[in-house]
Image (cartoon, rainbow, N blue to C red):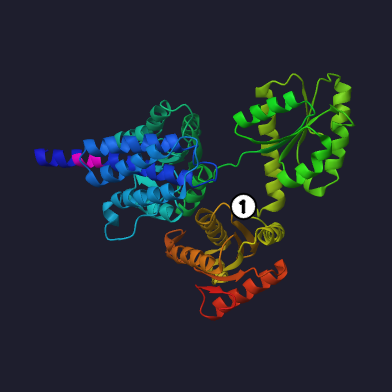
Amino acid sequence: MSDASQKEKLRQHFARRVTTQARIVLDTWQKIHSSSDSFTAHREELLAASDKLVRYAQRFEMEAHAEAGSTILELIRDWPANSPLDDTTERQLQSAIDALARSTLRRTDQSNTEAPHQFRRTPVYIALANAEMANRLIRQLEFFGFRASAFSSAEELAEACALHKPETILMDVNFGGDQHAGIATIEHLQERHDTPVPIIFMSDEDGSIQTRLRASRCGGEEFFYPAVDPGQLIEKIETYTHGNTVEPYRVLVLDDSRAQAKFMETVLKKAGMTAHVITDPMEIINALDMFSPEIIILDMYMPGCTGMEIARVIRQQDRFHSVPIIYLSAEDDVTKQLHAMSLGGDDFLTKPIDPKHLIATLHNRGRRARSLLALMIRDSLTGLYNHTHTLHLLDQEIVKARQKNQPLCFAMIDIDYFKKVNDTFGHPIGDRVLRSLSMFLKQRLRKTDHIGRYGGEEFAVILPNTRPSDARNVLNEIRGRFSELQQPAGDREFNVTFSCGVASWDNDSSQTLCENADRALYVSKEQGRNCVTLAGN
């Protein structure tokens, strides 16, 4: 190899390190905007990532990255720790972030003058022997908001993992050429991490139990043999990534002892849960209405009433019928404990409370409660809210909009020519199209928006605190991007479009709002489909 080619290879190696670090900065900034309370939580993370970016960029003489990183670093240092981000600093930071995003354009993006999509996720790494399939997957994944990178060697993959732990790795069992070389690579990589990276394995040649066991033992969550549809792969990658951060459990604590209540609050907050503590049992109804807890902890014996009596009152309200109730008491008589649980309780913890035992119990109860709730309010195919719960949420948002004097929009979406998709490619492909649109909407709308499957190929979107023109623009952008997505069907690909109608709330009922959106959707269909119509326009 000539000196010139060696220098070029070295330059590309350094450039990859800088751009990888730049994207870590972009991801961290997106994390800051993912929830209202994360500004101060991720300040140090953004500071450290930006500092590393500047050092890399200066060392490897990448001036644009160094300049943008230095601006970000200076602004963060001026942002006082444990203080919210003021509007001026946020705007300046966003401008610097945009400059960094433009600097981080890949060579294949140079023809595009717009800044690249700032991905909300940490990376997905792809290590496949078939380079064409890897590149095709990357294009598809980027449509869904993932940042994916493909690697041609185990060394490159190891280097990238050392710089930034991925959310998941898609790995060919024989990646690298030798039999089971891909599994060996993963075994080595997993040793570097305290918690294993979820791995999705693929194999065209070997689906034996011995290979599957070895793959499973090193973090293999899925094993595809002999072939897999790219659409199915993307759905699995979505399952093992954490773009949609799990919301902390909302725990209501009722204990008449202020000291015990304070102790509980400290333990819960330290575990990352949202705690609401009351010491007067007569406040329980207001607390339920205001806080809407997912788990309730009740002291068994309080002045004026018992925890069992409070549990019976709670269970009289249908919406709290399945919320787990956990009793706290010094009572160690098993018969009395069982009797207490027969009157509406789900678990019984004996004082003094072991914090680890308490948190483990809450996690177990919380996971099960959320699973059961999801079965009741979510559509089984798409994971979106079902028709009934979507209308319930719309009623709730109308109440909020009236109280806060804020705008509210409701949109109806209908996939164009969906029957033709089912007739041409079959219902399993049609189901995949429904899931891909649901995933597309979830990743491009805000956490405060509500998305439901209204029925069949119809979807509904509730957009709180959103003006009609903004709702139309957002949904039109989603429509345009979705129409570009290649839907896989075996060795063929096809495109799907949707039509949309948007209605703005004008102090009317939820039924009227739905009817207005439905009429606007009908206009979109009449105008040739694949468009967004605003009611009244």
**Mark 1 neighbour density, 10 Å: few (under 14) some (14–19) many (20 or more):** some
Q: What residue sits right under mark 1 in the picture?
A: 383
Using the image, determine if residue 272 lies above or below residue 317: above
Residue 266 in view in this figure? yes
Residue 177 in view in this figure? no
Left or right: 474, with 385 as reference point: left
Left or right: 482, with 360 as reference point: left
Pick whichever, 369 or 310, lies toward us.
310
Question: Which element is circle 1 on?
Answer: loop
Q: Which residues are magenta?
A: 11-15
Residue at 60 percent of width and 33 percent of height: 272
Please state the horizontal and vertical placement of residue 340, each as a whole percent of the image.
86, 30
Left or right: 465, with 171 as reference point: right
Q: To which quarter of the image does residue 271 belong? A: top right
Please state the horizontal and vertical placement of residue 206, each as a whole percent of the image.
43, 39
Pick whichever, 248 or 279, lies toward us.
279
Q: Looking at the figure, which quarter contains the N terminus?
A: top left
- Inspect the magenta stretch and tell me whether residue 13 lies in it: yes
Residue at 83 percent of width and 42 percent of height: 314
Residue at 37 percent of width and 31 percent of height: 185
Q: To which quarter of the image does residue 325 belong? A: top right
Residue at 79 percent of width and 33 percent of height: 346
Please state the horizontal and vertical placement of residue 510, each as a whole percent of the image.
71, 66
Please state the horizontal and vertical placement of residue 129, each as a whole percent of the image.
34, 44
Using the image, determine if residue 161 lies above or below residue 428: above
Left or right: 18, with 357 as reference point: left
Using the image, determine if residue 187 lies above or below residue 526: above
